[in-house]
């Protein structure tokens, strides 16, 4: 069971306080009407789903109710960092390699 | 009654002043406080404690700990308190304990199935199920029925558990698992840095192997060192000691799950305390000091009662003053087990011989034994045991371990006990729980913990360190290092390590399986996993058949699937597989150990989250009134909502008709408090609503309300409700009862992750308000009596809201309607809910104001064709499908959520399922909700289904039955007939019509 | 292939079981195969078997990075049923169920397919509407099903708490009598043995590290044992599907999540059907060995660790006690996890791709085991004909662009 650092509360809290919210850094197309059905489907449904480093969103549901990002290894479940919405990750797959 | 095997020893671990009487398989026995059921049974000379699962062979106690595969009992005297499957070796004796074997019919001493096992055993190699019982196909269920009769160990209780359970959460610097010499040393060393330390041990007292050791520490008995150390730890405020507490799981990010057994040693259903408690510990650093388990050797008929682990024999002698036999033969691959022979000899009973598989040894213990005059057979093995319900003797023969053969004639030795030791296996289970792969250590012939991402340390036996002095110094060092890693101390132990002197030991032999003069396949059964009757021959057969991966061997033979999870047999099984495949053990690999380390009570895992706390119910402020007025309740989300209010003698249908007619003809009242309410503020609130709702919000004035529909980005409806403009930059949004939390999360998601530039804030206020809806032609008259504001139609229009005082309470009143009648929704601060409700009821008395529940609400809204999200929609329905294109903004600038998906191919089909009304041909027949719809009546199966009934009722107001449904292309099929083939075989006909049945022009709500 | 029977067992017992043949061989990889199947779980092995048996393609390799049937095939709760809601899904699962019904005889391997029936409990009015809707749809699709009242449920499972004191009282259930359980490992072994006998190479301990392509078509796979040329490559890697897809630069509409299951210690027979509750969030059956086999809901995060979080176990056990209060003193023996690849609509992908000769069968979420023979059967057809089997057609990856999703969220044993 994960122990997660909320970057807003600045505390380590139990996983039970959080809800995972899927892949991070997916941007909604600015002009949805201008893109193809395939592109729209890609935005809606297609995901990196990596084995290894994953940038993902979490909601501090039973805490500050803020969404934030985490970089987590999906194989070892290690959390490398958590960071606020709008920030870029410091740990990326290129640096760490895919485990 | 006599305890024939209890000697006049000096153990402090049992209290001879407290004799305890217990019963086993219906017979009474006596033991002492401090005994386990196993030690007490051995003291009483009980040999057969159970029957094996597959072959029904008589079985005795083998171990003294969590490895025990045979002594698995049913403990407890009532159907409410009985416990299936505890191990006798881990069950503390208490006065009046009642235990019985879990297998054996009619009893364990005379078991009919044993005869079947003897006759049929040869036809039951591993995998035999897969090879037979296939023909004819129709008979498998009958075969299975018979097979299932033999299933299981103990029996489930038949009555509810009278005990309670709870949980505690802890944080600490260093969590130490295991209170043996390594763990205690680590605890002392870590605690002296000031670190917060928790140490747990599965046994009833701390000390681990020291509780049965005879090796002195600082010139004292080991138990004295334990007492002193435990006393020292107990005196420290920063240390928490948890005896009788098994770490069952080691989870990610250093979460340790511990089950503390608080009352099981005292008796059944003790009222003074919860029975068991799960501690969930988040530790900065974890030290695993779980020690090592002795391995038995695998030899012919090694399951006959009287065959035991060497260390278990020593434990019974030294800890419990119980000698489990009269004449011992010890078989060993190492010096260490010679202790057992010495212990036995010192009780005055006979050690017949030591059978050492090695060519020679000159270790201290061996030389000591030689001096005692005990026979030693070097280079020999016990190849076969004679006896059935108790060992009668053994065949001992010279062996060649390298080519796995017997090299000379066997000699028979009479004895009643065989102790064996194949060396020790570190207890790596917990270290594997978080995905770490153990690695093979050739030197100790065992697996040790591998690399891990956890903040984890291991010490002592777990690391393959066995000599006591090394164990202690390793424990002290590890404690200090772990404390330092947690930010306490400098990583070095300042105290003085106690003095011990370890006997010099010669190298042990890596031998697991003793050869027999016959091939393994023809030799007497050589058991590897006792509980599942897995034999060496079975493993070799699996290998021959192509099951070569250790996981395949495990699954094909059931090796390690028992309740001891392979503690006793796994390494031996791997070694036999490796030998038979010509590989090394590390090449063969190990299976993955998983939680639970030892089986853990369901009740403890659930803790207090049972019964009404399983999922706490939510109630409105008026709940007590509803109870007093006989309401039946419906579960909606977590809420208990009044479903209907039956009067004495009424059927449900009669209640509904009364409630509906009262509302349509005079006035009804509904508790609507459970609807979700979200307060939305900020200068961009309006723009935000534009983006999340399908309809426009730019022009909604202060004091006005509007109905809105929300879609997911896939274009499907997921919530709806009325939102009111409270102020230019402030709105109150209503959601469905079940959807409230999800909607708030949804709004936050979009705001925080996509549109942080919008200034808008959300706050859930559902619980702040009590909401009562009065509905019906007389509702205004009721409200007028108790409201300080003019609520006439000129002053208070449909879809307006006002602030007013209702019955002396400040209120927001919304003129909105879900029934199609003139309606007012009165919202007051929740604290005033009950008071206001009662005042409204009093004001309405002259109009026979009638409380109604969710069912009447559903009928009345369906008569108007109003949808209920989740009942009339299912996640595949768009607003257009609902014929609600009017709720879709056509001129909104921003491409609101869901819009883009409506232009996909599938959304443009003209045969999508669309919301319509249905009128059954028989106006008294209520279509079942969920009935499927077809266009063609006479079809064969499979039929072409074109929709289904989503809501269906009898309308007392209209005098006929009606339904809402989705039908393919239904909007353009009004007037056509459809058919509903029902589950009783009949087919009924209905006509597609508008979903608005009642007051289609909407006059009534506008009056 | 050596024929198995009770008589055979008797015969072999006289020779001390020394002469049983290998169930499958351990071949060295050939240079070229007509079809390479990535993933030696139940689905991959079934695909190979049906390709060989029904389409005459026998130059096939099944490449498995670990051991056969070691992924989700070995980790599920063994439930087989076909009472799904939508036509597309229920036809596919029913196709599979029909294959299950004769599979032990066909494979000459006892899969212990036990049609002991499955109850899906309803605890709210909406649950009961959904049950009614699903059972009606099943019946009109030719799939057996019944709606049971609370009293009928109580009679069938006397130990289930059907009282009104329950937090969410049982209001009824759907019942599929032909549903049940099977011995999960045996399914992989039975298919493997039969495929091997038809000439399929089963390459264990062989890991695919890349997929070689030329001009938009597959050429073969790179493995830890060298390059293996292939006419067609079929990916049946379940939780690892996205990892394989990445090798050709593809993303899939999948998320891989831990899904946990657990067993109690063995008990004397006490529960002889499968009981599932979506609302209370747990399901349970009792194996022929006596263990209570319990399934949890999925963990919400992406995870390839074959383990999930402890709180899910705690909640699941609380749910089991809520349903069966008498199990409170029973003890949990073992808990483990698999990696399930979930699709947004809780339905699988059985599909060609934009790369010629590359096929995917994935996205089964919690429903994969029960579909094993059916999925293998329709996937084999899709590969052999390079055209979807009619039953597989609705499960094309194109549905995510066209919007033709088949929303089966309500049909999963436990909502996810």
Image (tube, grey):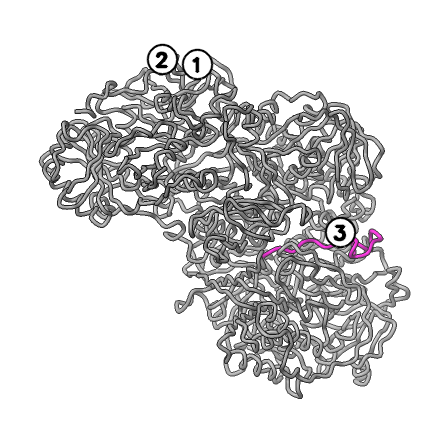
Residue B935, disc: 1
The crowding category of the residue bearing disc 2, from other C-alpha atoms within 10 Å (few below 14, some 14 to 19, many at least 20), is some
State which chain disc 1 sits on.
B
Q: Is residue A71 visible?
A: yes
Q: Which residues are magenta?
A: B576-595
Q: Position of residue A52 (x, y in %)?
A: 64, 46
Which of pointers 2 and 1 lies earlier in the amino acid sequence? Answer: 1
Q: Are marks 3 and 1 in contact (CB under 8 Å)?
A: no
Q: For the C terminus of chain B, give its image quadrant.
A: top left
Give the quarter of the image for residue B954. Answer: top left
Between the residue at mark 2 and the residue at mark 1, the CA separation in whole angstroms equals: 13 Å
Nearest-to-viewer mark from 2 and 3 = 2
Q: Is residue C413 left or right of residue B393?
A: left
Could you say which is closer to the camera, residue C326 or residue C218?
C218
Residue B974, disc: 2
Nearest-to-viewer mark from 3 and 1 = 1
The crowding category of the residue bearing disc 1, from other C-alpha atoms within 10 Å (few below 14, some 14 to 19, many at least 20), is some
Q: Which residue is mark 3?
A: B538
Residue found 90% across the figure and 66% down from its top: B408
Q: Position of residue B273 (x, y in %)?
A: 41, 67
On screen, residue B162 above or below C65: below
State which chain disc 2 sits on.
B
């Amino acid at each position: 069971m994960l122990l997660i650092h909320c970057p807003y509360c600045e505390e380590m809290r139990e996983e039970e306080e959080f809800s995972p919210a899927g892949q991070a850094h997916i941007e909604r197309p600015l002009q949805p009407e201008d893109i193809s059905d395939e592109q729209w489907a890609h935005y809606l449904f297609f995901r990196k789903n990596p084995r290894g480093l994953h940038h993902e969103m979490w909601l501090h549901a039973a805490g500050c109710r803020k969404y934030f990002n985490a970089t987590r290894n999906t194989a070892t479940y290690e959390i490398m960092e958590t960071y606020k919405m709008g920030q870029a990750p410091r740990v990326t797959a290129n640096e760490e390699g895919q485990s | 009654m006599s305890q024939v095997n209890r000697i006049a020893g000096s153990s402090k671990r049992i209290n001879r002043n407290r004799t305890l009487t217990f019963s086993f398989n219906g017979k009474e026995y006596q033991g002492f406080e401090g005994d386990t059921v196993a030690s007490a049974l051995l003291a009483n000379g009980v040999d057969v404690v159970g029957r094996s699962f597959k072959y029904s062979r008589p079985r005795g106690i083998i171990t003294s700990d969590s490895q025990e595969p045979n002594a698995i009992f049913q403990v407890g005297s009532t159907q409410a308190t009985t416990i299936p499957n505890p191990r006798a070796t881990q069950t503390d004796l208490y006065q009046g304990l009642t235990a019985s074997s879990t297998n054996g019919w009619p009893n364990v001493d005379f078991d009919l199935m044993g005869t079947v096992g003897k006759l049929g055993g040869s036809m039951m190699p591993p995998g035999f199920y897969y090879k037979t019982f296939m023909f004819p196909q129709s008979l498998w269920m009958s075969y299975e029925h018979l097979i299932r009769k033999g299933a299981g160990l103990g029996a489930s209780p038949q009555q509810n558990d009278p005990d309670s359970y709870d949980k505690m959460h802890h944080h600490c610097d260093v969590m130490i698992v295991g209170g043996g010499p390594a763990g205690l040393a680590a605890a002392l060393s870590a605690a002296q840095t000031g670190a917060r330390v928790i140490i747990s041990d599965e046994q009833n007292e701390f000390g681990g192997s020291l509780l049965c050791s005879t090796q002195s520490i600082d010139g004292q008995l080991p138990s004295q060192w334990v007492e002193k150390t435990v006393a020292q730890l107990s005196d420290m405020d920063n240390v928490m000691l948890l005896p009788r507490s098994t770490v069952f799981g080691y989870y990610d990010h250093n979460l340790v799950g511990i089950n503390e057994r608080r009352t099981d040693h005292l008796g059944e259903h003790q009222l003074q305390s919860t029975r068991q408690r799960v501690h969930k510990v988040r530790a900065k650093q974890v030290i695993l000091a779980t020690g090592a388990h002795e391995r038995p050797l695998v030899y012919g008929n090694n399951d006959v009662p009287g065959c035991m682990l060497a260390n278990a024999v020593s434990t019974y002698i030294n800890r419990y003053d119980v000698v489990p036999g009269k004449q011992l033969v010890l078989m060993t691959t190492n010096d260490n087990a010679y202790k057992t022979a010495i212990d036995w000899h010192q009780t005055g009973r006979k050690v017949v011989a030591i059978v050492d598989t090695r060519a020679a040894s000159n270790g201290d213990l061996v030389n000591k034994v030689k001096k005692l005059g005990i026979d030693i057979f070097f280079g020999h093995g016990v190849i076969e045991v004679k006896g059935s319900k108790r060992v009668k003797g053994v065949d001992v023969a010279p062996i060649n371990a390298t080519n796995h053969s017997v090299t000379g004639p066997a000699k028979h030795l009479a004895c009643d006990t065989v102790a064996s030791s194949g060396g020790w296996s570190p207890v790596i289970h917990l270290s594997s729980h978080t995905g770490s792969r153990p690695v093979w250590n050739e030197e100790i012939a065992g697996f040790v913990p591998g690399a891990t991402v956890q903040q984890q340390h291991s010490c002592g036996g777990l690391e393959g360190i066995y000599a006591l002095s090394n164990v202690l110094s390793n424990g002290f060092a590890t404690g200090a290092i772990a404390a330092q890693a947690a930010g306490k101390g400098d990583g070095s132990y300042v105290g003085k390590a106690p003095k011990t002197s370890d006997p010099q030991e010669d190298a042990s032999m890596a031998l697991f399986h003793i050869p027999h003069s016959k091939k393994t396949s023809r030799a007497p059964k050589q058991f590897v996993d006792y509980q599942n009757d897995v034999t060496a021959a079975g493993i070799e057969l699996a290998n021959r058949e192509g099951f070569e991966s250790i996981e395949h061997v495990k699954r094909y033979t059931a090796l390690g699937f028992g309740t001891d999870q392979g503690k006793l047999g796994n390494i031996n099984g791997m070694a036999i597989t490796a030998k038979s495949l010509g590989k090394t053990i590390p090449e063969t690999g190990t299976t993955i150990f998983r939680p639970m380390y030892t089986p853990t009570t369901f009740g403890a895992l659930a803790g207090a989250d049972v019964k009404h706390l399983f999922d706490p119910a939510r109630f409105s402020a008026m709940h007590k009134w509803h109870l007093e007025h006989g309401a039946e309740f419906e579960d909606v989300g977590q809420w208990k909502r009044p479903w209907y209010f039956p009067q004495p003698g009424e059927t449900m249908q009669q209640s509904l008709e009364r409630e509906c007619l009262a509302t349509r003809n005079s006035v009804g009242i509904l508790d609507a408090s459970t609807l979700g309410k979200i307060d939305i503020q900020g200068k961009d609130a309006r723009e935000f609503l534009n983006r999340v709702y399908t309809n426009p919000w730019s022009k909604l004035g202060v004091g006005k309300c509007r109905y809105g529909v929300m879609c997911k980005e896939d274009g499907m409806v997921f919530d709806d409700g009325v939102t009111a403009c409270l102020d230019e930059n402030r709105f109150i949004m209503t959601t469905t009862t079940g959807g409230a939390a999800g909607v708030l999360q949804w709004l936050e998601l979009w705001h925080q992750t996509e549109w942080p530039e919008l200034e808008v804030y959300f706050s859930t206020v559902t619980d702040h308000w009590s909401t009562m809806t009065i509905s019906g032609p007389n509702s205004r008259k009721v409200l007028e009596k108790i409201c300080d504001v003019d609520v006439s139609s000129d002053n208070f229009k449909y879809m307006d809201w006002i602030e007013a005082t209702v019955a002396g309470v400040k209120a927001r009143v919304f003129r909105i309607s879900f029934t199609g009648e003139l309606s007012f929704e009165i919202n007051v601060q929740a604290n005033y809910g009950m008071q206001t409700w009662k005042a409204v009821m009093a004001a309405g008395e002259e109009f026979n104001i009638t409380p109604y529940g969710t069912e009447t609400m559903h009928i009345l809204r369906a008569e108007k064709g109003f949808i209920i999200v989740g009942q009339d929609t299912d996640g595949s329905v768009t607003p257009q499908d609902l014929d609600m294109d009017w709720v879709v903004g056509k001129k909104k600038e921003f491409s609101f959520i869901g819009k883009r998906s409506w232009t996909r191919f599938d959304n443009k089909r003209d045969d999508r399922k669309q919301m319509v009304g249905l009128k059954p041909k028989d106006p008294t027949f209520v279509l079942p909700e969920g009935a499927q719809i077809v266009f063609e009546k006479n079809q064969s199966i499979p039929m072409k289904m074109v929709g289904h009934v989503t809501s269906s009722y009898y309308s007392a107001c209209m005098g006929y039955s009606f339904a809402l449904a989705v039908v393919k292309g239904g909007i353009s099929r009004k007037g056509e007939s459809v058919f509903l083939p029902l589950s009783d075989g009949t087919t009924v006909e209905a006509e597609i019509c508008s979903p608005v049945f009642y007051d289609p022009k909407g006059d009534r709500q506008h009056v | 292939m050596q024929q198995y029977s009770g008589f055979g067992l008797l015969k072999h017992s006289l020779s001390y079981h020394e002469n049983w043949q290998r169930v499958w061989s351990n071949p060295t990889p050939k240079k070229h195969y007509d079809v390479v199947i990535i993933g030696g779980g139940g689905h991959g092995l079934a695909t190979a078997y049906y390709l060989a048996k029904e389409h005459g393609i026998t130059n096939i390799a099944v490449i498995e990075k670990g051991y056969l049937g070691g992924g989700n095939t070995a980790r599920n709760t063994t439930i087989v049923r076909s009472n799904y809601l939508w036509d597309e899904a229920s036809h596919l699962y029913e196709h599979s169920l029909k294959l299950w019904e004769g599979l032990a005889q066909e494979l000459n391997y006892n899969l212990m397919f036990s049609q002991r029936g499955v109850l899906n409990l309803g605890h709210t009015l909406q649950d009961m509407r959904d049950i009614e809707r699903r059972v009606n749809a099943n019946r009109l699709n030719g799939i057996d099903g019944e709606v049971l009242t609370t009293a009928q449920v109580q009679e069938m499972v006397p130990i289930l708490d059907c009282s009104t004191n329950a937090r969410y009282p049982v209001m009824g259930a759907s019942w599929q009598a032909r549903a049940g359980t099977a011995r999960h490992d045996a399914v992989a072994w039975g298919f493997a043995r039969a495929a091997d006998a038809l000439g399929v190479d089963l390459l264990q301990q062989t890991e695919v590290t890349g997929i070689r392509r030329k001009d938009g078509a597959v050429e073969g796979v790179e493995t830890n044992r060298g390059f293996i040329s292939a006419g067609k490559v079929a990916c049946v890697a379940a939780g690892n599907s996205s990892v394989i897809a990445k090798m050709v630069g593809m993303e899939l509409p999948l998320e891989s999540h831990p899904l946990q299951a657990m067993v109690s210690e063995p008990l004397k027979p006490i529960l002889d059907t499968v009981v599932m509750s979506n609302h209370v969030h747990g399901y349970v059956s009792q194996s022929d060995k006596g263990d209570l086999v319990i399934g949890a809901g999925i963990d919400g995060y992406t995870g390839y660790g074959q383990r999930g979080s402890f709180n899910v176990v705690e909640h699941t056990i609380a749910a089991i006690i809520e349903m069966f209060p008498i199990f409170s003193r029973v003890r949990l023996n073992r808990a483990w996890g698999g990696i399930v690849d979930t699709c947004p609509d809780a339905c699988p992908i059985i599909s060609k791709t934009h790369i010629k000769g590359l096929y995917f069968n994935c996205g089964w979420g919690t429903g994969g085991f029960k579909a094993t023979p059916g999925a293998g059967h329709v996937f084999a057809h899709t590969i052999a004909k390079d055209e979807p089997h009619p039953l597989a057609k609705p499960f094309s990856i194109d549905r995510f662009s066209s919007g033709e999703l088949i929303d089966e969220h309500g049909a999963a044993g436990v909502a996810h």
